[in-house]
Structure formats: structure tokens, C-alpha cells
């Protein structure tokens, strides 16, 4: 039978209940039971420390992998921009792999977003309230610009998008 730290401690407790109340004499086997608890406690502590080291090494590995993922994502973003700028400069709007595995299209002025270069110029009508704070309401500004209105301090800009499938 495998004796656990809990079982060994319970045995010591039972032996403590058997101490002679008149003489204070310890029951037979008390010291061996205490020694067994100490041995089990040492083993448990060693296991705990091993687990803590393992957890720390896993955390360090996760941190390392996260850094590698961020680096790879930055590289992908850079490559996407690199490809997009060169396709745009060369006037190429679409490329295809000869095996049909992928193709890329440069969609000119496909994406729209609002650029607010001076928030202080924006009328309050083009801002939304966020608890005691105003910020540009880009959805409203975009709609107004598309309808032909001039919004002081903002404009609708068009961007190229590189689509890879």
C-alpha cells in the first residue's frame, strides 16, 4: 500500500490521541510515524518545487513563442505591404500561381476609412459622447462625406487593399 503524506499525518494524529495523560509518555511507534511524515513532506516539497520549475519553464517557452508569433506577424504585414507597393508601382492588379494554388488582386481604392487630422475642428455633431468625453464619430463622418457634405477637420480617404486567396 502506498502511504501518502495525508495518511502518514493522520497516523501521527491518532498516536497523539494515545499520549498518556498522566505521564505524557508517547505511544510506541510515534517517532517512526513522525519520521515518515517528514520523509513524505520532503518528497512532496521536492515534487512541488519541480512542478514550479516546470511551470516557469513553460511560461518562459510561451513568452518565447509569443515573441516569435509577433515577429512572424510583423514580417507578414511587411511582406504584404512590400508586395502591395510593388504591384501598385508596376501597375499590376492581379497575379496568379501557374498551378492555381493562389492568386492575389490589388483592389484600388477598395477600402474606405475616415482620417481625422484635427479633432478640434470637428463640429460636435460629428462627435459621440463617451462618458464625459467626445471623440469623432467616424461612421457619421463617412456617411456625411459620401453624401457630399464637407466636414471640417475630416475627410474620406480611399486605400488600396491586397487580397490573397
Image (spheres, grey):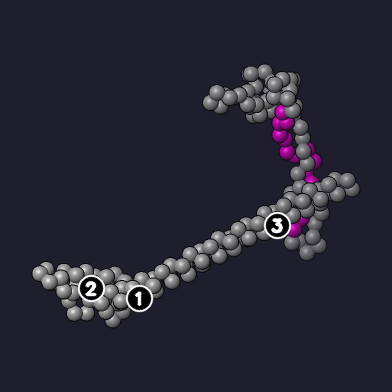
Pointer 2: what residue? 11
Mark 2 vs mark 3: in front: 2
Looking at marks 2 and 1 on the same chain, the residue that comes earlier in the sequence is marked by 2
Circle 3/circle 1 CB separation < 8 Å: no
Pointer 3: what residue? 72
Give the overall secondary structure of the magenta segment: strand
Q: Residue 139's spot in the image, x, y percent?
A: 64, 29
Q: Which residues are magenta?
A: 102-116
Q: Residue 38's spot in the image, x, y percent?
A: 33, 73
Residues 23 and 148: in front is: 23
- Residue depicted at x 78% and y 41%: 160
Residue 95 appears in the picture as rendered: yes
Q: CA distance from mark 3 to mark 1?
A: 49 Å
**Viewed as shown, does residue 141 lie left or right of 17?**
right
The quadrant in which the N terminus is found is bottom left
Pointer 1: what residue? 39
Residue 143 appears in the picture as rendered: no
Amino acid at each position: 500500500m502506498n502511504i501518502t503524506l495525508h495518511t502518514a499525518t493522520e497516523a501521527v494524529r491518532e498516536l497523539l490521541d494515545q499520549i498518556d495523560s498522566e505521564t505524557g509518555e508517547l505511544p510506541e511507534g510515534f517517532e517512526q510515524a513522525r519520521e515518515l511524515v517528514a520523509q513524505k513532506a520532503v518528497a512532496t516539497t521536492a515534487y512541488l518545487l519541480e512542478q514550479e520549475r516546470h511551470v516557469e519553464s513553460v511560461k518562459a517557452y510561451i513568452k518565447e513563442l509569443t515573441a516569435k508569433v509577433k515577429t512572424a506577424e510583423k514580417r507578414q504585414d511587411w511582406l504584404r505591404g512590400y508586395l502591395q507597393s510593388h504591384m501598385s508601382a508596376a501597375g499590376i492588379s492581379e497575379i496568379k500561381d501557374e498551378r492555381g494554388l493562389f492568386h492575389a488582386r490589388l483592389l484600388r481604392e477598395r477600402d474606405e476609412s475616415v482620417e481625422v487630422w484635427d479633432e478640434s475642428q470637428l463640429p460636435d455633431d460629428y462627435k459621440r459622447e463617451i462618458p464625459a468625453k467626445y471623440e469623432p464619430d467616424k461612421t457619421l463622418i463617412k456617411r456625411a462625406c459620401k453624401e457630399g457634405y464637407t466636414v471640417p477637420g475630416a475627410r474620406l480617404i480611399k486605400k488600396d487593399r491586397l487580397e490573397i486567396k
